[in-house]
Image: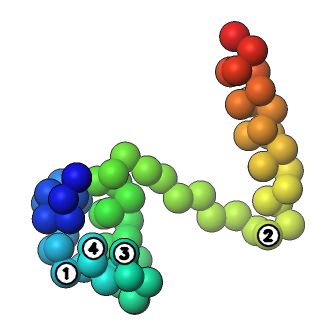
């Protein structure tokens, strides 16, 4: 997908998407628009909870693979 097409789907300018792609700062609202436009979600949780969540996701993936 071209950057201008991805930007249009996300409702942002191609400049904002280019900055994000290149690791430059963008506002949180623009980041959320990009994620939504690409069909993605971001989960924010305390660092201490990450191992438990990763373990649960791994178990879910194992269950899916066995079906």
Residue that carries the numbered disc 3 in the rendered image: 21
| Tag 4 and tag 3, C-beta contact below 8 Å | yes
Is any part of residue 60 visible from this angle? yes
Residue that carries the numbered disc 1 in the rendered image: 15
Q: Residue at x 18, y 54 (%)?
A: 9
Q: Is residue 7 left or right of residue 27?
A: left
Q: What's the mark number on residue 17?
A: 4
Q: CA distance from mark 4 to mark 2?
A: 28 Å
Q: CA distance from mark 4 to mark 1?
A: 5 Å
Mark 3 or 1, nearer chain start: 1
Mark 4 or 2, nearer chain start: 4
| Tag 1 and tag 2, C-beta contact below 8 Å | no
Q: Compared with residue 44, is residue 56 higher up or lower down, i.e. above or below? A: above
Q: How many marks?
A: 4
Q: Residue at x 43, y 50 (%)?
A: 40
Q: Residue at x 70, y 64 (%)?
A: 45
| Tag 3 and tag 2, C-beta contact below 8 Å | no
Residue that carries the numbered disc 2 in the rendered image: 47
């Amino acid at each position: 997908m071209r950057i201008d097409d991805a930007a249009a789907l996300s409702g942002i300018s191609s400049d904002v998407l280019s900055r994000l792609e290149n690791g430059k700062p963008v506002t949180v609202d623009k980041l959320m628009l990009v994620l939504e436009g690409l069909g993605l979600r971001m989960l924010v949780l305390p660092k201490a909870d990450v191992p438990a969540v990763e373990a649960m996701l791994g178990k879910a993936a194992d269950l899916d693979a066995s079906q």
